[in-house]
Amino acid sequence: GDLPQNLEEIILGMQLGPYAVACAAVLVGGAVATSRPVLDMIVARVPHAMGIMPIFVKRDETTFDPSTLPDQTGKTAIITGANVGVGFSTAKHLGKKGMRIILACRNPSKCQSAIDSLVREGIPRANLQAAELDLSSLGSTAAFSNKFLKDEKRLDVLVMNAGIGPLPFQLTQDDIETVFATNHFGHFLLWKKLAPILEGTADKHGEARVVVVSSSAHYNAKGVPLTEKELNFPHKGLGDGISGAYGASKLANLLFAQELAERQKSRPLYVNAAHPGLVASNFAVESVEKTAATLSNVPVMGGVLSAGAKLVLALVRKGVMSTGWSPDDGALTSVYLAASPDVPKSNIRGKFYVPIAQLNERTSAHAKDMKLQKGFWAFSEKIMADRGF
């Protein structure tokens, strides 16, 4: 039968953005957690509900288990944003299989703390290395890449995990909107700089992989910027409100992964996109806290706006922390794409996977737009060239 109208509106409300998902999680979890047919119906009718929370996923003996991965000794991975949340858990899963991990983090001290925690998990300290990388800065990204290329001989896996959530409009020192700079352009430059070593590893050792962390928030995007005016005027063309640039940046991640996969189809370099789901970590909470702090400085209405953001924060805490994925489970899709033998065996390229390691082919219309995909790649190249990279 049909979904109850109010319940369907709650689920469809996920299109409003990641905070709406978190708030809806509280209501949805209580209403339908025991009804498998209703949950399956929701997933069938709402593509972005697929894998978004544990209640939408049937776990059984066929569900991906990282313990089944082959030994990864001898391989090296870079994981951006590996000091916390899904990035940390990705490092933990891969490190436990013997892979050497470069934790690329904005804050070196937090990166070292993460390494200490991974050592306590049983991962040899010799297989863990901290490296400073601020993806919001093209200079920092170039410096990180140049050092890696100087010091290393191979790179088997690049996990583009780091990102920031919805924030009020602001520009970086490179004159790029902050969310887009961090979530897309920093990683785009990282690929450009590290392409030779990734391609060389694929050719010499039989394969290499790039995992781009995207999100179901890409369904919310009205497109991606193709001009600097669209990029750097407050969310012009990117969607409505503070979450507009975030959703567009997640669409950018998916378009980037698809186009890069197409460009690498002649060699064993496998590029795919992963969605970690709604994860019970501090990512969304910190984003709302930053937003509340910024809004408090707005003249006259600042106090009211900040209070509203704090109300959302309370709902986010309740929704995400009670019904979201754990970071360890949220990382599994990235881990699957980074290390599973299924990827080369089935020639998995340019796909969008959601928890837990499920292929979701029902991406948004914008994500399927080849003209937009190629146009956005060309625009990304122009942004790099105009800034001397």
Image (spheres, rainbow, N blue to C red):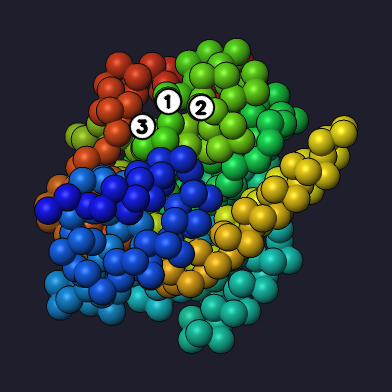
Q: Secondary structure at mark 2?
A: loop
Q: Quadrant of the C terminus?
A: top right
Q: Position of residue 291 (x, y in %)?
A: 71, 45
Q: Give the residue number, with chain letter if any, for mark 2.
A: 239
Residue 260 in view, yes or no: no
Pair 1/3: label in front: 1
Q: Secondary structure at mark 3?
A: helix
Amino acid type assigned to the residue bearing label 3 in the image? Leu
Q: Measured along the vertical axis of the image, is residue 35 above or below residue 61?
A: above
> How many numbered discs?
3
Q: Measured along the vertical axis of the image, is residue 57 above or below residue 218?
A: below
Quarter occupied by residue 283: bottom right
Residue 170 in view, yes or no: yes
User: Who's the residue at 56% across and 86% down the image?
Assistant: 120
Q: Give the residue number, with chain letter if any, for mark 3.
A: 255
Label located before the other in sequence (2 or 3): 2
Do tag 2 and tag 1 residues touch (Cβ < 8 Å)?
yes
Q: Give the residue number, with chain letter if any, for mark 1.
A: 222
User: Who's the residue at 42% across and 62% down the image?
Assistant: 27
Amino acid type assigned to the residue bearing label 1 in the image? Lys
